[in-house]
Image: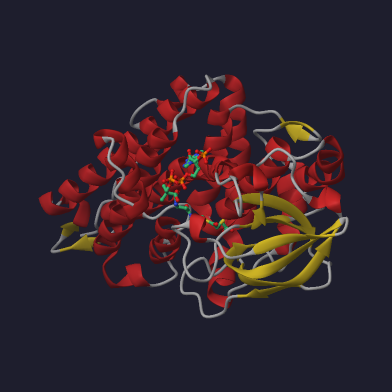
Amino acid sequence: MTTPPLPRAPRIDAVFDFDALLSEEERDWQQKARAFAQERILPIIEDDFEKAHFRRELIPELGAAGFLGMHLSGYGCAGAGAVSYGLVCLELEAADSGWRTFVSVQGSLAMSAIAKYGSEEQKQRWLPGMAAGELVGCFALTEPQGGSDPAAMTTTARRDGDAWVIDGAKRWIGLASLADVAVVWARVDDPSFGEGGQAVRGFLVPTATPGFTATPIAGKLSMRASVQCDIALEGVRLPADALLPGARGLSGPFGCLNEARYGIVWGAMGAARSCLEAALERSTTREVFGKPIGANQLTQAKLADMLLEVEKGILLALHLGRLKERGALTPAQISVGKLNSVREALEIAHQARTILGGDGITGAFPVMRHAANLESVRTYEGTDEIHQLVLGRALTGLNAF
Ligand code: TGC
């Protein structure tokens, strides 16, 4: 007797009519990013992850698609809405967190810093090339002793005549070894904060400047298809106009982190959706004990719980996106989204792996790659604990840092 064909898994995004909540322009961005992910990233990503290879030649293609700094206006940027940007993050991260991270570092961090705090000359010099993917930027905030407390920064910039001289070290800086320009945050003497006062200021450092060295961090078991670096800054001498005039104090870099964290709220749900799709497909195509594994109650309970969190996470992301478009999104709300999306995406990846059985640990499925990547996403842009404490402070009014 031949076994009848098993039913095909339905598309997850058809379960709720999420697309009905989007404008035509938003759906266009979603479709463009989904096509890019499927045609340009998915065919090569397992191999790149295995070989720890970053495929630099895709950068101009991301620029041509309009994804780089797409939420910014002017200077060659697309001027898209926050929801459109979020949908692009989701679709790219459904392929791999490394490529969503590229778009985040370039657009949400480096380009946002220049757009928010740069002079007109700085914007003209850097933004059009970065939007086109001809120039790459990085964002150097985190230091080797830890990333959670940027107020403990030790990198300094001092005046020497008309010049600035920067000394220090940064770690876990995405794209630094490929970058043309680094947005470097450093401590500067600032008498406006009283005698001996200091402020954190941002500098645009062309990476060809003597004294700037970026070294890719080897041995990563996560984000293997992207590049994170150590940076050494040894007597890096810059002209006076390297300073970003519009940022003074930690609210400068935090303003950019808000942008990147917002993208993660969406992006992590892309990784989660990809894991659920893999588990769902396997549930209807793999038989154990004479029936599809998806016919078992325990498997269905797992799938239902996964669906619940993907749908809730995407709806939360949409709500935050609409708030952002109204200019009403607060850092505490972003913390809710970042904490929830990454935590739930990781749980979904782990549950999906159990449904895939032994094959789930291989590169035949994207699930272990997503799980490994999400460990990085959980840590950067504010750990779970940082976001819990931001929310604890918002609830109690008491600072527990
Ligand atoms: P505090 O020192 O009291 O405040 C400093 C100033 O910053 C303001 N601020 C914010 N402004 C805008 N958005 C936010 N989310 C902000 N959070 C704080 C604050 O109002 C104050 O302004 P002002 O004008 O009064 O001076 O700091 P805090 O107590 O508010 O914050 C403490 C804490 C722990 C929440 C903060 O330090 C924090 O968020 N820590 C986590 C930092 C983090 O996410 N690090 C990872 C960065 S990831 C990275 O660098 C890699 S880039 C990605 C890559 O390259 O791959």
Farthest-out residue, front = 195
Q: Which residue is drawn at 53% across and 36% down?
A: 87
Nearest the viewer among 282 and 252 is 252
Across and down, in percent, residue 88 comes to: 57, 40
Looking at the image, residue 66 sits to the left or right of residue 16; the answer is: right
Nearest the viewer among 15 and 124 is 124
Q: In this view, does 399 lie above or below 178?
A: above
Q: Residue at x 67, y 55 (%)?
A: 188
Q: How many labels does the image show?
A: 0
Residue 24 in sight from this viewpoint? yes
The colour scheme used to paint the residues is secondary structure
Looking at the image, residue 209 sits to the left or right of residue 273; the answer is: right
Q: Is residue 204 above or below residue 170?
A: above
Farthest-out residue, bottom = 219
Looking at the image, residue 84 sits to the left or right of residue 351; the answer is: right
Residue 249, located in which quarter of the rendered image?
top right
Across and down, in percent, residue 314 comes to: 39, 35
Across and down, in percent, residue 282 comes to: 31, 57
Nearest the viewer among 219 and 212 is 212
Nearest the viewer among 257 and 91 is 257
Across and down, in percent, residue 350 comes to: 28, 60
| Quadrant (top left/top right/bottom left/bottom right) for the N terminus | bottom left
Q: Residue at x 57, y 54 (%)?
A: 101
Residue 14 in sight from this viewpoint? no
Q: Residue at x 80, y 38 (%)?
A: 119
Looking at the image, residue 301 sits to the left or right of residue 167; the answer is: left
